[in-house]
Amino acid sequence: MVKGLYIMDQDPFDLVYQKEVRDEIERLAGIDASPMSKEELHQDLSILQDVEVIFSGWGGPVLDQTLLDAAPHLKAFFYAAGSVKGIVTEETWNRDILVTSAVTANAIPVAEFTLSQIFFCLKNGWQFTREIRKTKQFPPKPFSCQGAFGSTVGLISLSTVGKQVCELLKPFDIKVIAYDPFITEEVAEQLGVELCSLEDVFLRSDVVSLHTPLLEETKGMIGKEHFAQMLPNSSFINTARGEIVREREMIEVLQERTDITAVLDVTFPEPPEQDSPLYQLDNVVLTPHLAGSEGKECGRMGQYMLEEYKRYLNGERLKWQVKRENFSILA
């Protein structure tokens, strides 16, 4: 029987690998040791000597030369979380270790969260919420709000999450435009999206939603010139990474343009510094990086890795395998 090991942070372990999933994995793999953290693993790397597969997740170990030297029989790494950028090394690829990730599973709740915020923003929900709190009365009807019908939603990057947002928006009477220099017109057409420039996304959209992977070239790609061009009463949603936005410049525009709303599930740093204006600005909505898998949603990631493991045992092509040539742009 294939010998396996669980290595990840222990706090979320039972949420990610729920009992029925663990029972199935352990029926198919010989797992003799208790689940352990990467810190516990590094106290005695000899436990890796006969291991062929590792089931991991948040807080998983870095697959560097030290670990790989201690695991001469390691063939596959099942990562029940999102990006493997902090896990996989050049040595991993050189050893031809199969790496598979639940990034697609983790993208589902992010896309769902984004969808909820898109529609709430199109109803000017956050503007009404803060106005009612301030005036202690409802605005007179008819309410002056955008509404969804005929609106334009702009997506920055058709990443894993961005594509899922496109799919979720298809049933609605909304125009979707997107900036992504790596997407072909053919793929955009399949997604029902019009490709445009980054500037056009901000100029034309009632809601702008950021889904760009954090790479060296994407750090600080969104700044003052983009926010300043946004339509009146439009909204900006960030469920990607805070570092992609030049935060001081965004704050400067938000202080001047009180009609714009920023829904920020991520910031940089995270959480913001105690004296950050983000806590004080009425037109900023802060959420604590909760768009990704939370609670029961975490179990989907473990389920995906169980399904991948079955494919591995059957010699089938892995559905969510991360390959050397594309792992840096997945998000």
Image (cartoon, grey):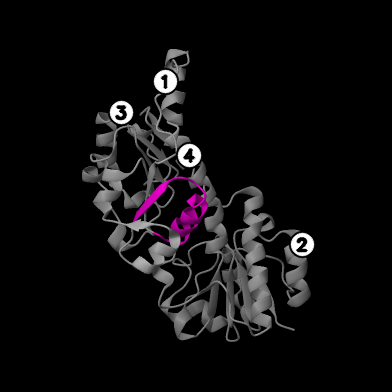
Residue named by callout 1: 131
Residue named by callout 3: 258
Q: CA distance from mark 4 to mark 2?
A: 36 Å
Q: Nearer the viewer, residue 39 or 238?
A: 238
Disc 3 marks which amino acid?
Thr
- Tell which circle, 3 or 1, labels the residue nearer the N-terminal end: 1
Which contiguous range is marked in magenta? 158-178
Disc 1 marks which amino acid?
Glu
- Tell which circle, 2 or 3, labels the residue nearer the N-terminal end: 2
- Tell which circle, 3 or 4, labels the residue nearer the N-terminal end: 4
Residue named by callout 2: 20
Residue named by callout 4: 119
Residue 45 percent location from the top left of the image: 59, 76
Mark 4 or 2: in front is 4
Mark 3 or 4: in front is 4
Q: Residue at x 56, y 51 (%)?
A: 109
Q: Is residue 209 magenta?
A: no
Residue 190 percent location from the top left of the image: 44, 64
Q: CA distance from mark 1 to mark 4?
A: 18 Å
Q: Is residue 142 left or right of residue 53?
A: left
